[in-house]
Image (cartoon, rainbow, N blue to C red):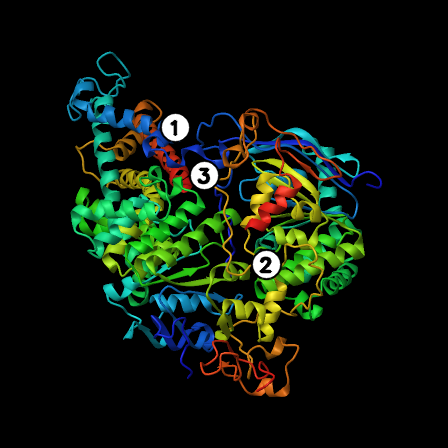
Amino acid sequence: MTGPPLLSVRGLCVAVGHGPARGPAHGSARGSVRGPAEVPVVQDLSLDLPPGGALGLVGESGSGKTTTLRAILGLLPPAARISAGEVIFDGADLTRAGTTRAGARQLRAVRGGQIGVVWQDPLASLDPVMRAGDQIAEAVRAHAPLSRAAARARALDLMRQVELPDVERTSRRYPHELSGGQRQRIVIASAIAAHQRLLLADEPTTALDVTVQDQVLTLLSRLRAELGQALLLVTHDLAVVAQTCAQVAVMYAGRIVETGPVRAVFAAPRHHYTSGLLRAAPSLDKPGVLPPGIPGTPAVAVATAGCAFAPRCPSADQLCRSVTPALAGAGGHQAACHHPVAAAAGRLEARRD
Amino acid sequence: MTEQPTVDGAGPLLAARGLSVSYPDRSRGRPAVTAVREVSLGLARGEVLGLVGESGCGKTSLARALVGLEPATGEIALDGQPLPSRRTRDQARRVQIVFQDPYASLNPRLTIRHTVEEMLRVHRLRPRPQVRARATELLDLVGLPPRTFDSRPAGLSGGQRQRAAIARALALEPDVLVADEPTTALDVSVQAVILQLFAQLRDDLGLAILLITHNLAVVSAMCDRIAVMYLGQIIEQAPARALLAAPRHPYTKRLLAAVPQLSPGAATPRAALPGDPPSPARIPAGCAFHSRCPEATAHCSAVPPELLPGSSEANGSRPSAHLVACHYAWPEA
Amino acid sequence: MTLPVLVAEAGPVTRDAGRPVRARWLQNRTLLAGLILLAVIAGLCACAPLLAAHQPDQQDLLHVLAGPSAAHPLGTDDLGRDIWARLLYAGRIDLLIGFAAVLAPFILGSMLGLIAGYRGGWADAVIMRVLDIVVAFPFYVLVIAVVFALGAGVTSIFIAITAVGWVSYTRIVRGEVLVAKRLGYIQAAQAAGLGTARILVRHLTPNVLSQAVVYAMSDIVLTILAVVTLGYLGLGVQPPTPEWGAMMQAGQQYLSIHPMLATAPGVAVVLTGLALSLIGDGLAAELGAA
């Protein structure tokens, strides 16, 4: 890795309490249930993202991947908090920034100014009563001292960059008048408006049709190449990661269980969960072949020692059930497993299906 | 109107002819939105037909029309008998549906056992003393553990709820099961299990399944035949392997190319389809796809193509099972 | 295309989702506090004969406007009647009317809401237009007008509140039904050929009434206030039956020399309102989360 990483997460732990999370949406404590101890939703998570790099954070629901993203941004829901670890962006520690006034200001500047975010539902991300062009212009002005006119011009430029057709007319439209793909492009335009160095994306294409998804993913790759932006992509879709990212980290029950270069991990997975996940996805290449599932139900927020995947793993033994494995491995490809899938066996498993 | 070819040559179990579904647009007297335009398809016993398409293609409206939830013009026939929009209880029983959202599919106040039992009781499918046992049998059939039987949906996971919804549908002993995006809201590992359940139902019960999804990979794993919809019409229909190996319609080709691939070496040149799926409120003249088709000609914008089989296929006398609605699909023609 | 919501396969993280309802509700502090307070108030009023040494209309003209004493814990009013006794007996009336007078609007309004929401079309149009007319009048104006027209008394109060109060329930239930009828399980029931009546009763009603029930709690408070207000205006429960509003009205003139007369019923109304609000809030949290 050349130079220090742009984003570095060290030993991040996020815990969620039971109380206000169940109450009315406005977060009042009235009617709250007396909740007992907090539950660890993310545990001991570490990752590094070099400038301009692309990392896919993959996991199923309950794995903690979205929570990790929110923790990085400091946007955890009231019931959740970072209980340990740190988030360092461009050398600055963002973890505790929210607690002081100066820190909060700095966090706001970083969020949006240096880190752009694209969420899953573009309709929810955009202000329904504000025209598309104005929303981008607002993002531009929030982080650069431009006049209204200059900001609007820049917004139109950005819209061209994200391949929106007929930018003049589109910029005057309201979000509900645009299609899903167009809305997501507006959101992306806002996320690159301030020359952000990092783009965080949470399932950015899950809500889109497959042809539109293809367009948006291609766009993201192109923009990254042009702007040198780093990308942290959170998704459940392994194929999307294969198409857009160079590195991948697989999450299960709040921990990273495998990480490494995408090609290496997908060709020869070392963790049994990754291997199961890869085999469980139906593929166009294997018509008529029903993929096998992974027996059991996914673990969420496991607080006890031992590998969280052990109950579902064909190779689990007493060691696995008692000692939590740490990430280990050579050449950047690491897996948290006491008995990693042997290279030859892994390929054999894949071939047998 | 071409007869729909079937898997074994016998008449289809479920046949739709010239089915159209439109929604009146009451505001400002705008014309009705036609979600499904003169669709014909057939489904044989024990067959899984995959219906794919993107937003606005009308696949959900078609599904609802087949189940009787949406009024439609045209004919639907089950085992040769006509099936009107307003159905008798017994008619309704024979075509059942499973929805996408496992959270909303079950009555939150009833235990899943009660949900299934109610179906048995209302349709008098079993005498009273046997209702409970039959419900247990059904819940068991879909692979739910006994401890979940007396839980309410809130205590079940997404995959379990979906299985409960399938059990409820099966309770009515339908001939046809329409599954509208049944696994879209589920994780991949759970999806695999549900798909296996569908396959088991097809094999053991001879159930005919119409699987509606936008996920082409799922369709390729599960289905015997695939039909591709665009703006309310079926634009290509063929046995699964044929369609996946050699798609004929430009839209199908682009759709397949757009699916992200897992294997490295997915650095294939991406001929991305420009623009967005159009709205069914504004259907282009001629071929509905011509506005986005890179191979469109003037002829395409004027004359809508018919869904026709290829003229020369290897199997000689039998009409080809591969149907395409494109003027230029068959180079030999 | 509907947004695919990735569903937690591992099951609900909240541990209490499958637990029996009662256990969950008892842990809700707000709800518990409200229920206890209401139980205390209702209990005191119910045991009025045991707790009050005197009859509520027993006059003692030798001891008018007396302060608190051993014989009269809260003193006496302008006719020498025991305030404590009157307070408790009045409570019975007010609480009873408050709860009962909410029942009819609740039932009527919910039924209309179900029909309007599920059937749509003509029924919906007619019901909503009638609703618009009723809503156009301020609540009290209409209630007072009806009571005035029918003559003061408990029956008139019931009729007036029913005739005016059903609208909120109809709106709430109709809104819930409009949403619920698009949900999978209702559509599945329709697809399975279940009849309208069965769908309405078995499937819709239990699932759409929760918001109406929460509203009913606050409505009881409003109804009690309405009864109290009508009593204050002389249109409600007629003397000599004790009633909190009437007591407040009577005690008004003696506020400087004998504040207890008006304050005691006032405090009673406030506490009852507080209890019902807490219950409403607690229920809202429970039913909203459910």
Same chain check for tags 2 and 3? no
Residue B114 visible here: no
Where the C terminus of chain B falls, by quadrant? bottom right
Image depth: mark 2 or mark 3 in front: 3
Give, as a three-letter code, the residue at label 3.
Answer: Pro
Is residue A7 or residue C127 the one in the foreground? A7
Same chain check for tags 3 and 1? yes
**Mark 2 Cα shell of 10 Å, populated few (<14), some (14-19), many (≥20):** few
Q: In the figure, is residue C72 to the left or right of A116?
A: left
User: Residue A1 placed where, x, y %?
Assistant: 81, 41
Same chain check for tags 1 and 2? no
Alpha-carbon span between mark 3 and mark 1: 19 Å
The image quarter containing residue A249 is top right
User: Residue A284 placed where, x, y %?
Assistant: 57, 60
Q: Which residue is mark 2?
A: A129
Which chain is indicated by disc 3?
C
Q: Which mark is residue C12?
A: 3
Alpha-carbon span between mark 2 and mark 3: 35 Å
The image quarter containing residue B300 is bottom right
User: Residue B21 placed where, x, y %?
Assistant: 41, 73
Most distant residue in the right direction: A3
| Label 1 close to label 2 by CB (< 8 Å) | no
Give, as a three-letter code, the residue at label 2.
Answer: Val
Which chain is indicated by disc 2?
A
Q: Which mark is residue C27?
A: 1
Where the N terminus of chain B falls, by quadrant? bottom left
Is residue B224 or residue C100 the one in the foreground? B224
Q: Which mark is residue A109?
A: none
